[in-house]
Image (tube, grey):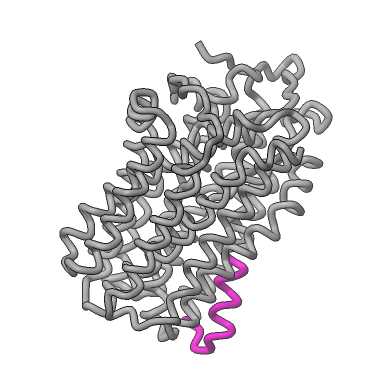
Amino acid sequence: MTRNLLSVAALLFGTLFLFMGNGLQGILLPVRGNLEGYATTTLGLLGTSWAAGFVIGCLVAPKLVRRVGHVRAFSGFIAIIAIIALVSGIVIDPVWWVILRAVTGFSTAGTSMIIESWLNERANNESRGAIFSLYIGITLLGVVGGQLMIPLEDVRTPVLFMVCGIFYCIAMLPTTLSTAASPQPLKAVKLDLPALYRNSPVSCLGILLVGIANGAYGTLGAVFGAGAGLSDTSIAVMMSATIFAGAIMQLPAGRLSDRIDRRYVLAAMSAIAALAGLLIFVLHPSSPAFLIGLVILYGAVANTLYPIAVAHANDFAASEDFVKVSGGLLLLYGIGTVIGPTIGGPVMSVISPHALFLVTALAHLLITGYAIVRSRIRAAIPASDRDAYTTIPTATSPTLTPQSMSLADRGSNKAPESGDPAVKFG
């Protein structure tokens, strides 16, 4: 175990600073853009372009990694992200920000793919869970640490953009200087979305809608906070607390979904998220403590939906199809994160900043309704035959690749009983 951890120590150290840069840049752009007077629709496009770039990166980046190798590709992708962070602090222009954000999303997909495939290869059956859990903790710590740096400097200056660049450069050094062997080249995975839908309609629609809700909140949450009158410090606390709350809720929600029909848990968690969103939209809380409390409640339940939906899809899939299932669900999640900010920005501009949670509430209500309907059509797999639930971080933006999903979903999956056959991928 110790030897396995030492072999990826440099990679994990770099990952911490990579996600610190991601967390800081992700909240810095909308906060600075809001102060510059950019329209909410324009700020929403920052998330849309990032997600679009990420989806393209999931499809294209593996070819680049196979061509030049993991270390060179990793350094190249981070160098691009660092350059963009610095340029964004110099060129204060919404059009350029949107374009550059797409390139950042593309490069982030590449870095995530390399990190997670590297970890997967270095881990064995005895250490995989511990290493992946450590990776999840590092990503969460990095994102939160980056977000909490917002109050430390005036966002109107380029200083925080320079800090992002520094974090990214530090992230590049450990793997560049490490003497550890590089992992084997990535393998291509052919996705089949129609077969994925036949395998689990609830997971397909649910993941798409979760992407819409998470994409809208992840991109526009800071804009909402500013519109609701929160200080920069309160905004940073709010955004970070939702991640922590979601992490804490992973285990109880997952264990509950291992004991009863996952669709019931998915419906219940979505209903609570919808209720919290509707309360924010209708009440327009004036108390910062009450407002942040409702947002934390929202984040606690909303961040449990992705892994539950993934586990439900794997319940009905054969073990050799885990990578296809996971990759397809990630692609749907990415598409959702493109749609979410695109819808959320104009809705907030027309109605109010609080209408962000009207968008998320509608998405979560649709998940609740469809999960209940499908539970009446298709029988659940007995608890003893289900795939093991594994916590998966989604944070505020998609950070997973097909490689990471195959790592997270690896388990002793069993076929469903007769009368509810698993759909095989051709």
Judge left or right: residue 79 versus residue 329: left
Residue located at (62% from left, 64% from top): 244
- The percent coordinates of residue 179 (x first, y second) are 53, 36
Q: Is residue 248 visible?
A: yes
Q: Main secondary structure of the magenta part?
A: helix
Percent from the top left, x then y, of residue 283? 50, 80
Front position in the image: 256 or 123: 123
Q: In this view, does 225 lie above or below 116?
A: below
Q: Is residue 201 visible?
A: no
| Residues rendered magenta in the picture | 284-298
- Position of 422 compared to 426: left or right? right
In the figure, 190 relative to 169: above or below? above
Residue at screen point 42% across, 51% down:
212
Q: Which residue is rendered at x = 31% and y = 65% of the image?
A: 347
Reply above or below: 15 against 325.
below
228 in the magenta segment: no
Q: In which quarter of the image is residue 3?
A: top right
Residue reaching furthest right?
A: 384
> Looking at the rendering, which quadrant does residue 55 occupy?
top left
Q: In the image shown, does 326 or 99 lie closer to the viewer? A: 99
Furthest residue toward bottom: 287
State left or right for residue 9 relative to residue 83.
Answer: right
Q: Residue at x 47, y 44 (%)?
A: 177
Query: Which quarter of the rendered picture does the N terminus lie within?
Result: top right
Give percent across and percent down for residue 332. Answer: 43, 37
Which of these two is toward me, 392 or 264?
Answer: 392
Counting from the top left corner in percent of width and height, residue 91 is at: 17, 66
Judging depth in this view, the residue of 389 and 115 nearest the camera is 115
Give the image quarter of residue 300: bottom right
